Image (cartoon, rainbow, N blue to C red):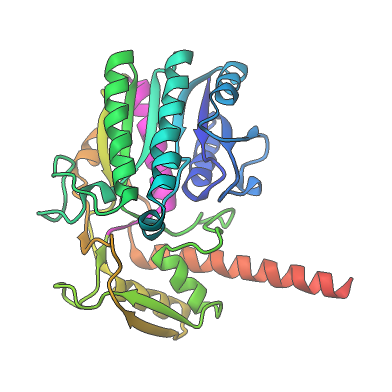
Amino acid sequence: MTVLVTGGAGYIGSHTVHALVDAGESVVVVDNLSTGFSAFIPEGVPLFIGDAADESLVENVIAAHRVDSIIHFAGSVVVSESMRDPLGYYRNNTMTTRSLLNTAVTCGIRRFIFSSTAAVYGNPDDVPVREDAPTRPLSPYGFSKLMTEIMLHDVAAAHGIDYVALRYFNVAGADPKGRIGLATAGATHLLKIAVEAATGQRAKIDVFGTDYPTPDGSCIRDFIHVSDLADAHRAALSYLRAGGASATLNCGYGRGYSVLESIAAVRRIAGRNFAVRHAERRPGDIMTMVADTSRIRATLDWTPRYDDLDTIATHALAWEQKLLDDRESLHRGVRSA
């Protein structure tokens, strides 16, 4: 049987596709390539270019490839953008998933893994935050994911679907083998911006808010390596196949680093300094977000391999340097031609 991965050409999706293929799984991808790259999909994995909301397309893919499980990544993920375009986020995240779930029900899919976010919590009352904490999103992005979680719960109960909703904390890093990484233009991930600055592609990096009641005044985040997150999806699939009950799980390490600490780690690993500018707080930003990971560790057969900020930053920097070298090589080739 085959696993359908929507958004499988994107950052987290492509890492998960590689992890599944490395484990011997049969995989098929649906991606509209709005932020993904076909080159990131392993050789031999079928790619259907289209929208996960296209029920006819997805139904045909499921039938043709004998799909029995869906891992759903496709969607929009930038908090600040969601503040400017809430309707776009409710369309791309909530409404797309509604269409995908309708197709899953029609086709008799029984296993569904959903890409959710810690943004559903808002500013938590207690840190580390548990999965049963109140959900009070601060952005349309967070609300769009929370609405989808509620919808998934209801659809699963009505139609006999088993699911895992993985609430991501701050995803960073790149494939340790250097095959893939974060390449989307204009990405807003902190470590991505920092390694761009470290490689001379940015003149400075802005820190939005240095007056929070935290040890150094900047926000605190729980970073998780993208390859560990990909392994969590693979473990979630194995869990559901073994008859596991539906679950909502935090995906983090349970350890927080401030924005300024994270920038310092990149500076140290790169051996380069770059300018940092203190800027005003941004609407929708959460002050402190660290995962309570006891539930995921008790539920899934999952042991992180890259639980270290320096390792995450090292892999992110190596990938960024590869992107830069590839662009410069291409530019030299064009000029010599």
Tell me where residue 121 appears, x and y as whole percent. Answer: 21, 49
Q: Where is residue 322, by image quadrant? A: bottom right
The residue segment tinted magenta is 222-242
Position of residue 151 measured from the top left corner of the image (x, y, whole percent): 30, 29
Q: Is residue 275 shown in magenta? A: no
Q: Nearer the viewer, residue 115 or 77?
A: 77
Residue 196, image x and y in percent?
Answer: 51, 73
In the picture, which quadrant includes the C terminus? Answer: bottom right
Residue sitting at x 52%, y 64%: 186
Nearer to me, 98 or 30: 98
| Quadrant of the image occupied by residue 241 | top left
Please name the predominant secondary structure of the magenta segment in the image: helix
Rendered residue at 34%/49% (across/down): 141
Residue 45 visible from this viewpoint = no
Residue at point 57%, 44% (across, down): 9
Of residue 171 and residue 300, the one placed in the foreground of this image is 171
Q: Is residue 238 left or right of residue 329?
A: left
Does 190 sit above or below residue 293?
below
Number of marks in picture? 0
**x, y percent for residue 328:** 70, 73
